[in-house]
Amino acid sequence: MSVLDPTQIALMRAISGATLRNSVLANNIANADTPGFKPSDVNFHAALSNALGQGAEAIENVSFAPEQMNSGVVRADGNGVDSEAEAAKLAENGLEIEALEQVAGSRLQIMRTALGMNA
């Protein structure tokens, strides 16, 4: 059992999922010119939402995995990456990571203050 409350754990897991998604989206962009490459994504929102409905233990144990996406865009060489769409997703995900980190950090600072750990 964790000392942290379920909300803080959920924030930390969301940061983990968003970080994995960032890597997957960057990989998609890096392979934009690779013939036959199919893009992937990480739907950490759905996995986390499902875990939130099941309780604290499910939140702590939730896992995320990349899934191959059917983008509908396939070039003649079989590559399915739309570089502009992937770049937009990457930018949006980066903003989400930043917001999650700010909220998680603020909550940790509140706990430190409440415990008298701020000097």
Image (cartoon, rainbow, N blue to C red):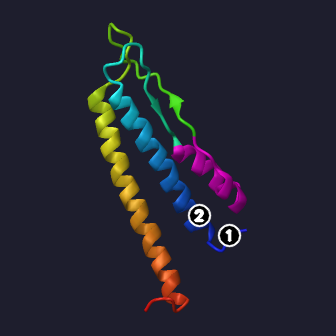
Q: Position of residue 20 (x, y in %)?
A: 48, 44
- Residues at circles 1 and 2 in contact by the CB criterion of under 8 Å: yes
Q: Is residue 16 above or below residue 31?
A: below
Considering only order in the chain, which callout, 2 or 1, is on the residue closer to the N terminus? 1
Query: Type of residue at label 1?
Result: Ser
Q: Quadrant of residue 55?
A: bottom right
What's the distance in space between the residues labelled 1 and 2, CA to CA?
A: 8 Å
Q: Quadrant of residue 36?
A: top left
Q: Is residue 112 above or below residue 10?
A: below
- The residue identified by callout 1 is 2
Q: Is residue 34 above or below residue 107?
A: above
Q: For label 2, count other residues whose C-alpha is less than 10 Å away and answer few (under 14), some (14-19) or many (20+).
A: some
Q: For label 1, count other residues whose C-alpha is less than 10 Å away and answer few (under 14), some (14-19) or many (20+).
A: few
Q: Give the main secondary structure, helix, strand or loop, of the magenta stretch.
A: helix
- The residue identified by callout 2 is 9
Asked whether residue 47 is drawn in magenta, I would say yes
Residue at x 68%, y 53% (from the top left corner): 61
Q: Quadrant of residue 89?
A: top left
Q: Is residue 45 left or right of residue 96?
A: right
